[in-house]
Image (cartoon, helix red, strand yellow):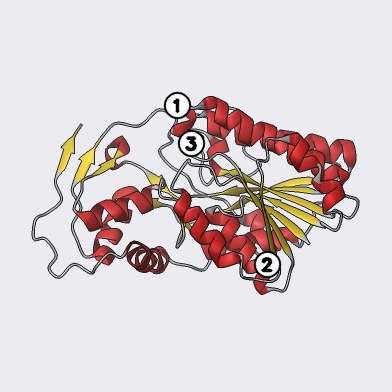
Amino acid sequence: MILVTGAAGFIGYHVAQALLAQGVQVFGVDNVNDYYDRGLKRARLERLLPHGGFHFRKLDISEPDTILALADEMPDITAIVHLAAQAGVRYSIENPFAYVRSNVMGQVTMLELARRLKQLTHFVYASSSSVYGANTKVPFAVSDPVLAPCSLYAATKRADELIAHTYAHLYGFPCTGLRFFTVYGPWGRPDMAYYSFTSAIAEGRAIRIFNRGEMWRDFTYIDDIVQGTLKALRRPATGTPPHTVYNLGNCRPQKLLDFVATLERLVGRKAELILEPMQPGDVPSTYADIEDSRRDLDFAPVTPLEIGLGKFVDWHRQYHGVREPSVSPAREPVARLA
């Protein structure tokens, strides 16, 4: 049995679904918090719960007593895929304590559980491309220094890597961190730009573009992320200590304005743009060096942006009941400084 934390979340839902499709028993954990629409989280769970191999419990990973009790209750857990976290760069400025509680305390709690599970073979956990901060050398490689995070979210994710390294050193069980690069796709998070942009364009609302459009992101489709995660799971870290970190990205950064233009084509409407300065905690670009992932995991993202976004827009229309626009507005996008 594999324990997946954040099973009601975007990546956790897809990873659990993929494991179930392979005949693996999955024990899902999530606290189903209100950071974004709980209805979306419940809808994901409703698609997992009918599967006979899926077992779910509503638990908070930052509460040691309930999590550590699983060592006795679920001793047949052989691996952990720890994807639960408080996400979002900007929200970490508003609510820093949520990040320390979920991302740091949660990481320690899950690692404490891992060392108590006698059959555990591997602890895989989510890190983030945010750990690279404002590094100017691109593409970002796992060997690059990550000493200057630009947000508390990034700092907690870097702390997670250091904590996992320490546990691998102290207790000898394999730990693998995955630095995800701007994951998108169906059943995604409404707070992510691609989701909020799609909703706004479909509804004729303006969208805010930060750094006046001079932003690049290594958008990575969810199916590619899931395949990379499962390949990492099947290859426990080795070495002294047995801890390693990989980038999982598309290795094809897109300029944000080009990304918006692709969305306009897919949604069938022009966007009204409000160009704004850079937000605190944000970075101008992300770009994954995935040579280590290719070599060790045979990781090979295959989904072009237009195909992946097309699948997301189709899901968005279906999930939200949005009709196809009968006539695309003739007006050109309006860009104004704010």
Does 229 sit left or right of 219 as displayed? Answer: right
Closer-to-camera residue (73/265): 73
Q: CA distance from mark 2 to mark 1?
A: 35 Å
Of the 4 image quadrants, the one containing the N terminus is bottom right
For marks 3 and 2, the one nearer the N-term is 2
- For label 3, the SS is loop
- Name which residue type carries label 1: Glu
State the residue at coordinates (75%, 37%): 109
Instruction: Answer few, some or many: residues within 10 Å of disc 1's Cα (few below 14, many 20 plus, some between 14 and 19).
Output: few
For marks 3 and 1, the one nearer the N-term is 1
Between label 3 and label 2, give the one nearer the viewer: 2
- Residue 238 in sight here: no
For marks 2 and 1, the one nearer the N-term is 2
> Can you identify the residue that label 1 sits on?
94
- Mark carried by residue 136: 3
State the residue at coordinates (51%, 54%): 41
Q: Considering only vertical position in the picture, is 44 above or below 107?
A: below
The quarter of the picture where residue 149 lies is top right
